Image: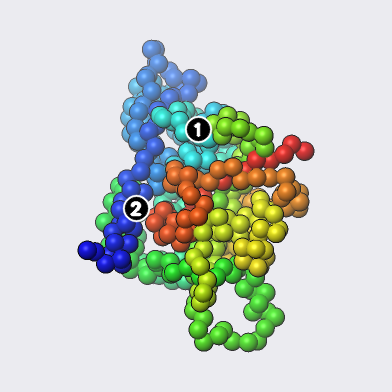
Amino acid sequence: MAAPHDEAAAWSEEAARRVWAGAVPLQVHLHDADVTALPPPPAFLTLGPRIGYLPLLIPVIKAHFSNALPPGVDTVWFEYKGLPLKWYVPIGALFDLLCADPERPWNLIVHFRGYPSEILSPCEGEDSVKWSYMNSLKEATFIITGNSKSVMNMSHADQVALWESVMKGNLDGYKSISTRLKIGPFEDDGLVRTASAERKRQQNSDEPESPGSSKPCRVPVRLYVRNVQEDLEYIEDAVPVSDWEGVSYINRPFEIRKVEGRSYITLEHALQTLLPEFFSSKAASRADGSHPAGALDSAADSSDATNSSRSSKEAEQALASPREVGAAKKTKVKLVRVQGIELDMDIPFLWVANNLKNPEYYLHICVYVGTRKQ
């Protein structure tokens, strides 16, 4: 009979392999304005890796439509029901966020002209995606360890090998490089203490940590919060997202300290802390007795790990407005998805973080909230 530790390790290995093997079936159509041949080319069917990114599919998609494309310089972008898709969001997270009722295959439109630069940040193909991935990895490393030196000090060869393993979905190759960064797994569960609450404690007290306390565990989390109708009976009837104003893109690290006698932290508990504006204040205080972390604490804390103007711009956009906070009692969480799974809210949060995170060490969580009309 296998020891509990060995059994847990086997489950974690299986979960990781399923995450890396996960894919979204795509049916890609060429936009009518880009068609220069008759009859129009058929749609292109492919699998989009959940942990991958849409621009990485451009070479095979372009090859399929090559005989029908207009002359000139390509500026490729994707659209779903009129919404330009953000290229730096993993395919799986985009699908979970935008398809209330999972659509298989997922019907996307590809454009080779008319890039909507007022909506999407520039993308120069694989190089841009690689830069975005490495930048996110630095941010996550800073959140977890307090600095990003392990990533900054990677050799060029290791950076190339790590990126190629992500592009090719090679988990074994990825693990052989990523384990050298020494940034995981996350430690056992303990008492929640949010980042802002910890800073406040340090400012107001000169007392050292108690001898039994351990270094806090900080989990990098990216939340995609989508508003849907409050009176929605069936989630599949949600009105499609028409613009990105209806979605909040939020980075909030989740901090945990081990405390004797504390039961494990559930996913529901974590969400109450991460998104207090969507839970009553009574529920949030019952969860951890502290104030929620400020929006995008991770982006602020990891300023030495990135010079990205895109990150800072989106950090400002993601900050919760007073109106959003005041609307807490007018919202209700209707659906939570991680890697395409609607998880039981009682599941241990750190199991989710350790086993369902993406290769850049962020846990991507899609949350649907019902909002009352103003």
The percent position of residue 119, horizontal first and vertical second, equals: 60, 39
Residue 15 — which label? Answer: 2
Quarter of the picture holding the C terminus: top right
Q: Is residue 70 left or right of residue 175?
A: right
Of residue 37 and residue 303, the one placed in the foreground of this image is 303
Question: Residue at (69%, 54%) from the top-left corner?
Answer: 280
Element type where label 2 sits in the image: helix
Residues at marks 1 and 2, CA–CA distance in whole angstroms: 24 Å
Label 1 crowd (10 A; few <14 / some 14-19 / many >=20): few
Identify the amino acid type marked 1. Answer: Asp
Quarter of the picture holding the N terminus: bottom left
Of residue 275 and residue 301, the one placed in the foreground of this image is 275
Q: In this view, does 186 lie to the left or right of 313?
A: left
Instruction: Give the residue furthest to the front.
Output: 1
Q: In this view, does 374 lie above or below 278?
A: above
Instruction: Give the residue furthest to the left.
Output: 1
The percent position of residue 58, horizontal first and vertical second, equals: 38, 36
Of residue 98 and residue 135, the one placed in the foreground of this image is 98
Question: Residue at (64%, 79%) from the top-left corner?
Answer: 202
Question: Residue at (32%, 57%) from the top-left corner?
Answer: 11
One can see residue 222 in this view: no
Label 2 crowd (10 A; few <14 / some 14-19 / many >=20): some
Element type where label 1 sits in the image: loop
Disc 1: which residue: 101
Of residue 221 and residue 160, the one placed in the foreground of this image is 221
